Image (cartoon, grey):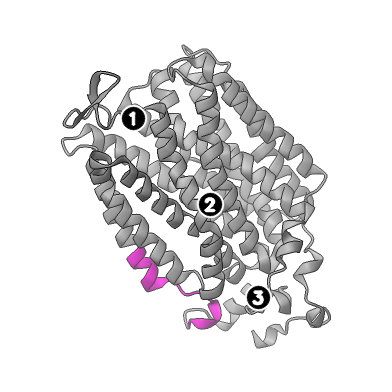
Amino acid sequence: MKEDMSVMTVFNGTQRSVYDYTGDEKKYILWAVGAGTVFGTSPTNWAVVKYGAKWPFLIAGLVSSFSTTLIPFAAKNNFLFLLFLRFLQGIAYSTDFAAIGVITVRWAPLSEMAFFIALLTCFTGVASMITNSATGLICESSFGWQYAFYIHSFVGLILFALWSGIYVDDPQDTKRISEKELSRIHKNKSAAHLDKNGSVPCFKIFTSPVILVVWLNAFFEMTAVIFFATYMPIYLHHVLKFPVTETGFYVGIILGMNIPLRLVAAAFSDRIKFISEKMKIIIFNTLSVGVSGLALACIGFIPEDENMLSFICIVIVMMFIALNCGGFYKCAALHARQHAHVVIAAIQFTKCLALFSAPFLVAFYVSNESNRIEWIPVFLSLGLSMFAANLISVFVFTDKPAEWTEKKEYAEVPVDESKC
């Protein structure tokens, strides 16, 4: 955008493109999304739990699409309006994980939790792969960078139109689900789990050691994901000296290639029976958060002339992160059961905190984006934090449902699967 000299402004006595943002302005643009997500997490979670995912998620999609359309106008005319639009995008973004949580609770069999979570959380990789690759091509084309926003907005409207026409909130409310399929979805779920009107024990959830450690692992890993999604193009281009078009392509590949691995890992997590569920959770989380954290800590020390080695290490980190569906995500789903939507929505909250923490790390340590040495403490501090969070999880994570997932009146009442 900063190479677009069609609109000029004066900064410190010199002319520059109005789109050539300072480091602080870039920080505020990123933080506006985080602020919107923080603001929106509680009300959107309440709306999804009360009304289901269909309509709140549709409204969020429309808000996201229309605000995206207006971003080129705001970027040209008013910085505060640009921040407001980014804030709206953050509010829309806050609906994602609440919707994922409700879909998993209502549609996923207990034996396929990891696969459902893996499939539904692929959206980050898919979106990043498409966005970075397509945007790189659009920016280099005769259309200009503005059309990157217009095209993404148009595609978003089409996708949410499909969502409104296809999605149903509960498998019991559609004729497309057979009795046999419904029985499989409800298998081994308690009556309390299937009670859509049950109250949420918020205090017990937010004081559970298992859930707190789940959120700790999620926070540091989400910070790494946001860091990669936001700053990987900058690091590849300015430090490792990849051309702009290649940078967009490589970032898309890095963020997207973990999708098949994510699904394969989920299948292994659900299907392997000779290892206990608890041990599988610990193994997957150690690879996803612990090992990837150590690899991340090492990236900054690789000399810039070894750019392909750095690229390979970044790929390895993102591939290991893909295994989180069998780690803290699965622990959250199995431990919180029917309240998993609250826990997973709170993971979204940790993700919006990551929208602050990742830019803060970079802004604190990096003043010259082309200086590899300044990036070292960013990689090191984030990688070691991930390793420490995983170390705690080894002693805390479990696959057992929490005592607060069972209501007293349901404690001795099993589900009659013949009536499912």
Q: How crowded is mark 2: few (under 14 residues within 10 Å), some or many (20 or more)?
A: many
Find residue 186 and name its label: 3
Name the residue type under label 2: Val
Marks 2 and 1: CB-CB under 8 Å?
Answer: no
- Residue 344, compared with residue 258, is above or below; it is below
Residue 38 is labelled as: 2
> In this rendering, is residue 75 above or below 380?
below
Question: Residue drawn at (72%, 79%), measured in percent from left and top?
Answer: 191
Between residue 188 and residue 25, name the one nearer to us: 25
What is the C-alpha distance between the residues marked 3 and 2? 33 Å
Residue 261 visible to the viewer:
yes
- Counting residues from the N terminus, which is met first, the one under dot 3 or under dot 2? 2
Which circle, 3 or 2, is nearer the viewer? 2
In the image, residue 67 sits, relative to residue 231, either above or below, namely: below
Give the amino acid type for the residue marked by disc 1 in the picture.
Answer: Tyr
> Furthest residue to the front?
13
For marks 3 and 1, the one nearer the N-term is: 1
Q: Nearer the viewer, residue 282 or 411?
A: 411
- Judged from the image, the secondary structure of the residue bearing numbered disc 1 is loop
Amino acid type, mark 3: His
Q: 277 above or below 304?
A: below
Per the rendered image, the range of residues in magenta is 160-174
Instruction: Please report the residue visible at 62 percent of the width from the left and 78 percent of the height from the top.
Output: 196
Query: Residue 330 falls in which quadrant of the image?
Result: bottom right
Give the Cα distance between marks 2 and 1: 24 Å
**Residue 379 percent coordinates (x, y):** 58, 25
Report the residue marked by disc 1. 21
The residue depicted at 45 percent of the width and 68 percent of the height is 56
The residue depicted at 30 percent of the width and 35 percent of the height is 136
Residue placed most toward the observer, 79 or 287: 79
* Mark 3–mark 2 CB contact (< 8 Å): no
Q: Position of residue 274 (x, y in %)?
A: 78, 53
